[in-house]
Image (spheres, helix red, strand yellow):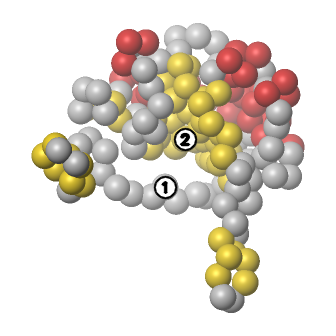
Amino acid sequence: MVERKGRPPAARPVATPAYSVAQSAPHQILVCKACKHKGEACAPGHALLKKLRAAIQAAGLDVEFEVSGTACLAGCVPAHGGACVVGWRATAKATWLFGDIDPAQPIDDLVEFSRLYAAVEDGWLSGRDCPPRLCDNTLARIPAAMIVTREGVLQ
């Protein structure tokens, strides 16, 4: 448990256990499926996960992308109801997080972003390269991690 100054230790929510997601494709799309605000599974996240898996397969991108559900990505806004957070990551590429994604809306922009992400070597796109709806919903673009040790650079 984490002790916070002046407050009792924060209990870890049972709905979001610590785990890593094993990657079986060159790229991974992560869909938040655990709601930290309710302490239970996220029905909109599960719906988006199912819809996005089908769309990625229909687009012929399923060899390039694994679409996985994950623990809370901590980017949702409870007031937005069923809006979801989705992330893209790959080895040696920037990681992207987009929020306020409504699973009831068309997801063509998510598929288009997947195409763009797969096409760039380092995953680094500018905001104007992104589909317009995603440009407005960008939570983070995180550079690829470079870890330097005594033995040298690790990716």
Left or right side of 92 for 98: left
Residue underneath mark 2: 30
52 shown above or below 7:
above
Residue underneath mark 1: 21
Q: Earlier in the sequence, mark 2 or mark 1?
A: 1
119 shown above or below 42:
below
Q: Is residue 47 visible?
A: no
Q: Give the quarter of the image for residue 60.
A: top right
Q: Quick check: marks 2 and 1 in contact, CB under 8 Å?
A: yes
Separation of disc 2 and disc 1 at Cα? 9 Å
Q: Quadrant of the N terminus?
A: bottom left
Q: Is residue 37 visible?
A: yes
Q: Residue 21's spot in the image, x, y percent?
A: 49, 55
Front-most of residues 7 and 82: 7
Give the amino acid type for the residue marked by disc 2 in the picture.
Answer: Leu
Q: Residue 61's spot in the image, x, y percent?
A: 74, 39
